[in-house]
Amino acid sequence: MAAIVNLNGIAATFPGAEKPVFADIDLSIERGEFVIVVGASGAGKSTLLRVIADLLAPSAGTISHEIETRTDRREIAMVFQEARLMPWRKVSDNVALGLEGLSVSVDARNQRIADALKLVGLADYGDRWAHELSGGQRQRVGIARGLAVDPDLLLMDEPFGALDAITRQSLQDELLRIWEETGKSILFVTHDIDEAVYLGDRVLLLGGAPAKVVRSYDVDAPRPRSREGEDVGRVGAQVKADLSTLFDEGGGI
């Protein structure tokens, strides 16, 4: 499969900082691939997503995209840890937020909103207000907002981190279904190693100061997967052991 995004020697430095958050990041994401980024707090996981999304300029390196550019879509979309729904907008209008500024007719806009809500299991929720939704439903709206702009790459910054365990597992399964139905590439940040190896084709471990990709793990477990499966458990145990070693060496903090 062909890579749709290539990062070469990427570094990111905050203003006034003496050293970069991360440096020398080389990463390729293939079309349809589900890639997970894990690492300790402060390793630059969320910052990496912001750089790829062009919300933060890298201090070094280059990023290239092999994605078709059109005026009726956005090549890359981002889903945040909190859904960030606007309380004065109904669900459908929150989903429509990313479509503003695109060359999309009213009919096409409405169809995209309807399709995105159906895809996340909220087909009948378009006229509801944000305060009428559960936490899991709000996150579904956030995912629908990202899907509505028809991106090739969906960036997800710990979207399930604030949810209870049962809702989290349910949304993990929903996300896998959406990924399989749409064929989107996904780059997903999480602190949860079990979540990482259950969802991903590949897991990247960030560590060090400045951070870099310490190791990449291929998750060869067949889909659909069992959370208790032997292959999933084996990769998860290795990631946890390597992350523990980083802490012991002082490079994961």
Image (cartoon, grey):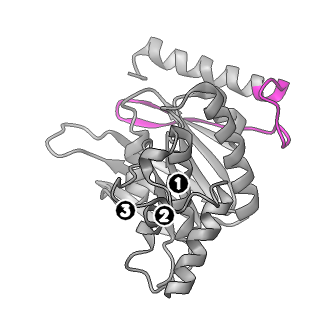
What is the span of residues highlighted in magenta in the rendered image? 206-232
Up the image or down, 226 lies above or below 183; here it is above
Relative image position of residue 77 (x, y in whole percent): 48, 62
Q: Is residue 35 magenta?
A: no
SS assignment at label 3 = loop
Mark 3 nearby-residue class (10 Å; few <14, some 14–19, many ≥20): few
Q: Is residue 76 visible?
A: yes
Mark 2 Cα shell of 10 Å, populated few (<14), some (14-19), many (≥20):
many
- Three-letter residue code for mark 3: Asp
Against 135, residue 236 (above or below) is: above
**Dot 3 or dot 1, earlier in sequence:** 3
Q: CA distance from mark 2 to mark 1?
A: 7 Å
Q: Are marks 3 and 1 in contact (CB under 8 Å)?
A: no
Residue at 67 percent across and 62 percent down: it is 118
Figure disc tally: 3
Q: Which residue is mark 2?
A: 95
Instruction: Examine the structure image and report whether residue 227 is included in the region drawn in magenta.
Output: yes
Residue 182, image x and y in percent? 70, 64
Q: Which mark is residue 9?
A: none
The residue that label 1 is drawn on is 141
Is 232 situated above or below 88?
above
Q: Position of residue 49 (x, y in %)?
A: 44, 50
Amino acid type at image mark 2: Val
Give 44 or 184, whichever is nearer the viewer. Answer: 184
* Residue identifier under label 3: 54
